Amino acid sequence: MSSRKLSADELKLHQAALAAHDKILAVKDAEKVVPDAAARTAAINFLLGTGMLKVIASAGGVTAFRAVAKNEMDIKKDMAPEEAMVLSHVQASGNEGIWTKHLKAKTELHQTVIDRCLKSLVQKQLVKSIKAVRHPTRKIYMLAHLEPSVELTGGPWYTDNELDAEFIKLLSSACLHYIRDRSFPKQNRKRVSPNQIRLYAIGAAPSYPSAQQIQLFLSKSKITETELGVEHVEMLLRVLELDGEIEKV
Amino acid sequence: MADAETVRLCTQVVHSHFGPLTTNIATALLHRGRLSFPQLLRYTRLKPRTVRAAILVLVQHNLLWHAQTEEEGEVLEFNTTECLKRMRFGRYVWLVENMFGNAAAEIVQLVLDHGKLRPLDIISQLSIYDPKNTSVYSQALYKLVSESYLKPSTLLSHQSPRDKRIKYEAEERAKLTGFPTARELREAKEVAEARLKREEEEAERVGLKPKPKDQLNHRSSKKKVAEEVVDDDVYFRVNLDKFDVHIRNKLIETAVEERFNRYAVVVMRATLKATESKQKSLSDARSDPCSTNAIVMHIPDDEDLSAGLASNSKKPSNASLVRQYLGLMASADNPTPAGRAASFLSHSDNKVYVEFDIISRRLRRRVLESVARERHGEDAVRIIRLLLDVGKMDEKQVAKVAMMANKDVRPLLSAMSSDCLISTQEIAKSTDHNPTRTFYLWHVDLDRAYSTLLSSLYKTLFNISARRQAEQEEPEIRAVLAKCERTDVAQDEKLLTRRERELLSEWKRRREKLSVLEMRVEEAVFILRDFAPGRNSDE
């Protein structure tokens, strides 16, 4: 790898690529930046040679270049080619992560080599190992700075990859209280035996709460930090319905 | 043929009611199905005289059926349903006493003690000590017969209905052309069943016929010879079905109380009362219609119905309140299928029906759920309700919808399936039926679950009475009880020592506990076995 400074054209191209969306510079855009064909080819060739640009074949067969940032390049500079290969696959998997077995199939490297690469990548804090809720035994890797997707974590009901039964119980009892408060009228005396509670007459009942209202109540009541969507509340309500505590109207 | 638990329970009932010799015969019949007299002799190894006497006793108490077969001549068959209902006799007497007073209770008790009796015998037996009370008894008797708490015992009620059912069913089936569908077969069965029932009713009406005419005559001529009101030549037996109706109505009231409140119960009781005279057996899917006015008439005046309702109209009339309660119990505010399944009544243009079928289905489900709760905890109930709701479901789906961890669901499912509460359905992905390439779907097979529950309940009942027996036969207790039998001790309890009195009261307390337990189990049995409209009770 040559150590000379970048020429003006090369710098312009690299910065245009970095500034672009996704750090990708299409061939057409490159033409605009450096109109002279020979100079452009030379510059791109040099950048490719130093590893500051990468060729990407996008969907339509149009070639494009992806800029590699300076620090990213520094990391990759003293990396074994296997490591780079493994890293690129991990990178490609995004926030879904990649299972070591798939990694092995894709890279066609020996298991021990992959293990060594992953170990050193983890040490460099480039990738991290995560656990998926659905396949608790699989070793799955993804880039260190990414958050695992909902698919992997299992949504709000999972804490440390286990279904948080206590949390669910807490929330569903809160929902039940909310619904119960709205399903029965105020009792006359403070303490009445359970067979003497007052009921709403059919026309007199207020509208029963909907899933949206309950979601609003849960988010306002600050019972939990976790963000719950309407679909999550509906799951909770379904469980309450199965327990025979509430009825769907 | 009955299963092992039923046989054990029946044998025990017969033993405690009739003693060891009769038990011998009952056991042979229960284990081997219907038998002819010579066969019975061989299997019981008793003298013909003894066997004949025992058979007479059992027939007198409606526990044996005759059947005439072509191959074997006359054979005898044991009536398990009737036998198991003997456990409820105490309750029947109590019910009668509450409804019609002491005299009627004594009559029912006497008839129950003797199986079947003629009116004259009943009256003379009861008025031995008190000849003046004859008219009281005959009035009570008339009341019992006219409201069909006592029914005539006919030739037909001693014949096994099975042969006829099979015959009628075959006749119906012969009418079908081509390969019969499942539905046609079921319809044929129903037609045969209806024909059987009609015949039975006709036979019973024959026994009653002279009664209303006699009664009218005597009223008009002011000659109060009450013995002649009821047909004297007819043997009467207790109509257990009619009493079961009352037990059922009580159960419905309890269910209403749990679901709504005390005031709704008042309305429900009135509704049931309004149609009570027409409720003859438990097999009706819904009650006869009755109007709101009739219900209002049956509500006691001192009930303040408005206390249980929060409505926006001020000072509503009693009738409108009743209508409100009826609406609540009919789930009028919830027109979804779930709401309908939770309803007690249905009403259409001022006619109110009590939906026995829906209620019984719900009560039976509740028994199943409570058993699941008892044995496997709250989560099991959730799974069962889910499966009942959606039908068949994969293990993973169950875990997801019920919001439980996979590792918790798996053992629960297998534990419940070993208790026969739930069952699996296999769906092979390939033709070789390899277990690894097969879906296993879980579902609740209600019939299977109920019959397993029922037999385990029979087992419980057997164990309870075996326990009671054992308690009684402890040497110390037996000594005390024997001492209590002495006439001088019976008159003066002070002759017992303190220790003996303590022992006695302890024993009584235990016996009471066992009886309460027995009553609760019996209630569950009632729900599962008897309170099932549309299903034949002895199948």
Image (cartoon, coloured by chain):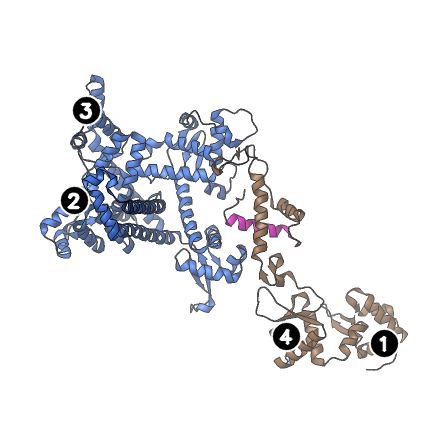
Residue to which mark 4 is pinned: A103
Q: What residue type is disc 4 on?
A: Leu
Number of residues whose C-alpha sits closer than 10 Å to that of mark 2, classed few (under 14), some (14–19) or many (20 or more): some
Depth check, mark 3 against mark 2: the one in front is 3
Residue to which mark 2 is pinned: B57
CA–CA distance in space, label 4 to label 2: 84 Å
CA–CA distance in space, label 3 to label 2: 32 Å
Question: At 61% across and 52% down in the image, what residue appears?
Answer: A231
Residue B143 in which image quadrant: top left
Question: At 84% across and 76% down in the image, what residue appears?
Answer: A41
Residue to which mark 1 is pinned: A43
Number of residues whose C-alpha sits closer than 10 Å to that of mark 3, classed few (under 14), some (14–19) or many (20 or more): few
In the rendered image, the vertical position of residue A193 relative to residue A157, given as above or below = above
Question: Is B402 in the magenta?
Answer: no
CA–CA distance in space, label 3 to label 1: 130 Å
Q: Are marks 3 and 2 on the same chain?
A: yes
Chain in brown (letter): A
Depth check, mark 3 against mark 1: the one in front is 3
Residue to which mark 3 is pinned: B132
Q: What residue type is disc 1 on?
A: Ala
Query: Of all residues shown, which one is farthest toward the top?
Result: B221
Question: At 67% across and 65% down in the image, what residue appears?
Answer: A95
Chain in blue (letter): B
**Bounds of the magenta span?**
A226-244
Sooner in the amino-acid sequence: mark 4 or mark 1: 1
The x and y percentages for residue B296 are 43, 26
The x and y percentages for residue B438 are 46, 65
The x and y percentages for residue A142 are 67, 69
CA–CA distance in space, label 2 to label 1: 116 Å
Number of residues whose C-alpha sits closer than 10 Å to that of mark 1, classed few (under 14), some (14–19) or many (20 or more): many
Q: Are marks 4 and 2 on the same chain?
A: no
Q: What residue type is disc 2 on?
A: Val
